[in-house]
Amino acid sequence: MIRRLSAAIALSLIPLIASASERVVSKSDLGDRWPLTVDSGTLRCRPFRGNLQILTIEVDGKVWAVNGTAIGQGFPEINPIWKGNPEIPGAKINIGPLIDLAKSLCG
């Protein structure tokens, strides 16, 4: 009985191990490199297949894809809150620093 209970507890923890790591991030974290039109959000990294990660940011209750893997899993593209590059018409600010920060959450 105890062995079965231990196994059941161990199995119930598997989703927690694979769940997302998260952190509230803001413009102050990246300064001039902040690529969004919003001031802050909850950044998440969830391990996926192999060494892929699903990177998202939640802003005002809406979750946006930060990388292609997240887009492939059905999260909406971040374009509506991704800041345009004032120096290059039609281009966006480099989102790489936000991606790096999100990936660091998966450690």
Image: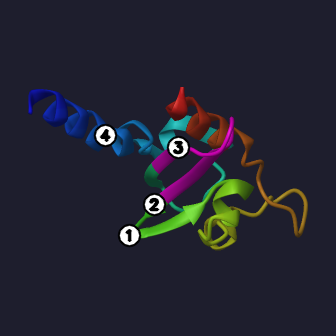
At x 64%, y 74%, the residue is 80
Looking at the rendered image, the disc whose residue lies closer to the viewer, 3 or 2, is 3
| Mark 3 vs mark 2, CA separation in Å | 12 Å
Determine whether label 1 and label 3 are within 8 Å by CB: no
Earlier-in-chain disc, 4 versus 2: 4
Q: What element carries label 2?
A: strand
- Mark 1 → mark 4, Cα distance in angstroms: 30 Å
Residue, x 90% and y 60% (percent of image)? 88
Q: Are marks 1 and 2 in contact (CB under 8 Å)?
A: yes
Q: How far apart are marks 1 and 2 (CA)?
A: 6 Å
Tell me where residue 60 appears, x and y as whole percent. 39, 68
> Is tag 1's residue or tag 3's residue first in the polypeptide sequence?
3
The residue that label 4 is drawn on is 11
Q: Looking at numbered disc 3 in the image, what kind of residue is underneath it? A: Cys
Task: Check disc 1: other Cα within 10 Å, few if <14, some if 14-19, many if 20+.
Answer: few
The residue that label 1 is drawn on is 61
Q: Does the magenta stretch include residue 47?
A: yes
Say which residue label 2 marks: 58
Q: Which stretch appears magenta?
A: 43-57
